[in-house]
Image: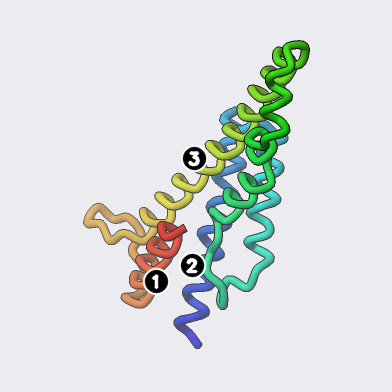
Amino acid sequence: DERKALLGEMRTRFVRALKTQIWVLIEQGFIDSAHGGLLLGIVEQQLDKDLIESKLETFEFIKVMIDKSIVRTLSSKSFLRLLNVSGLRSMLKDYVHGELGSLFALLSGFVMAHEQALHHMVDMHKVEADGHAAPRSQLERAFAVQLHKEVMEN
């Protein structure tokens, strides 16, 4: 079906644009190489999916990161009890700050790359009078709008 294939192509273009934006942010120093490598791995997983049949799940990783991350440990009753042990408090505080800083860097880097990729895709498919590239067809324009909705639902 041509409509499914075109939507799949639009999804693939978006994920590739996202990957490019992550590299740009790494090169500009907004994301360090460790976090960038993790984000690139997550994006590669999206490219491994059948993007013709399945919706984009670019924010799905955030749910996984928070669910499996240090946030779950930090909010556990046993960890909170450890914070009350005076000899451990200072060390645990430094640990907490480091882990939360790392999680923030990862998530903020992803959001920045995601927004830039989304703007790139939207700009690429706008019809503007000043000569910017226009979609090849009404169908492609409709799928650009569909892709935008799909991404924003995440």
User: Horizontal and vertical percent for residue 101?
Assistant: 61, 27
135 horizontally vs 14: left or right: left
What residue is shown with label 3? 112
* Image mark for residue 10: 2
Q: Nearer the viewer, residue 71 or 31?
A: 71
**Dot 2 or dot 3, earlier in sequence:** 2
16, 88: nearer the viewer: 88
Q: Alpha-carbon neighbours of circle 1 within 10 Å: few (<14), some, or many (≥20)?
A: many
Q: Is residue 34 left or right of residue 51?
A: right
Looking at the picture, does residue 88 appear above or below residue 147? above
Say the numbered circle drawn on residue 35.
Answer: none
> x, y percentage for residue 5?
52, 79
Q: Which tag is nearer the camera, tag 2 or tag 3? A: 3
Amino acid beneath label 1? Phe
State the colouring used for the structure image: rainbow
- Which residue does the image show at 56% across and 73% down from the upper left? 54
Tell me the CA gap for discs 1 and 3: 23 Å
Q: Are marks 2 and 1 in contact (CB under 8 Å)?
A: yes
Disc 1 marks which residue?
A: 143
Badge 3 amino acid: Met
Q: Secondary structure at mark 1?
A: helix
List x then y, in percent, for residue 113.
Answer: 52, 43
Tag 2–tag 3 contact (CB < 8 Å):
no
